[in-house]
Amino acid sequence: MFCRIVNGEIPSRRVFEDDTIVAFADVAPQAPTHVLVVPRRHVASLDDLHDPALAGRLLTVAAGLASTLGLGGGYRVVVNTGPDGGQTVSHLHLHILGGRQMNWPPG
Ligand code: AMP
């Protein structure tokens, strides 16, 4: 489904894009700022990410976006993976969550 967002077939509120990555607002935000960082290429989950360069790029973009989005006080990056990890969309995505105090442990 995120392939269709990346391709523009499903509308989204994009906050970043380059040749390998698209980032857009989560449709059901769990924090005042909730953005998803997604590789353009289909990678089903973190378990299928066998590309250190892309992994690094995803994290670097996430950190840059956190700064751009004003999360200087801190933020959380989450990668839900597999059924027990709570992954509901089978296209790798990093959640950037911020704008409120995060709690630990997560649910
Ligand atoms: P996960 O549960 O980690 O797989 O995260 C999937 C996320 O995708 C959830 O936070 C959803 O709210 C979000 N989501 C699902 N459909 C859309 C959409 N069309 N546009 C933006 N976010 C979406």
Image (tube, rainbow, N blue to C red):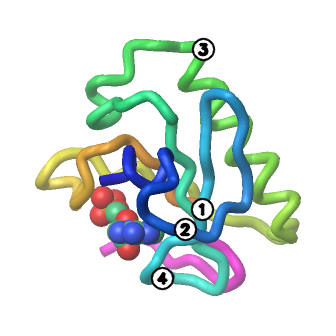
The label on residue 53 is 3
Q: Amino acid at mark 1?
A: Phe
The label on residue 30 is 4
Name the image quarter holding the C terminus: bottom left
The label on residue 24 is 1
Q: Is 105 placed above or below 101 here? A: above
Please tell me whether mark 3 or mark 2 is closer to you in this view.
2
Queried on whether the Cβ of the residue with tag 4 lies below 8 angstroms from ligand 1, the answer reads yes
Residue lying at the far front in this picture: please name it.
9
Q: Is residue 36 visible?
A: yes
Indicate whether residue 102 is drawn in magenta: yes
Q: Is 87 placed left or right of 91 in the picture? A: left
Queried on whether the Cβ of the residue with tag 2 lies below 8 angstroms from ligand 1, the answer reads yes
Q: Considering only order in the chain, which callout, 4 or 2, is on the residue closer to the N terminus?
A: 2
Residue placed under numbered mark 2 in the picture: 12
Queried on whether the Cβ of the residue with tag 1 lies below 8 angstroms from ligand 1, the answer reads yes
Where residue 63 sits: x, y (%)? 75, 47
Q: Considering only order in the chain, which callout, 2 or 3, is on the residue closer to the N terminus?
A: 2
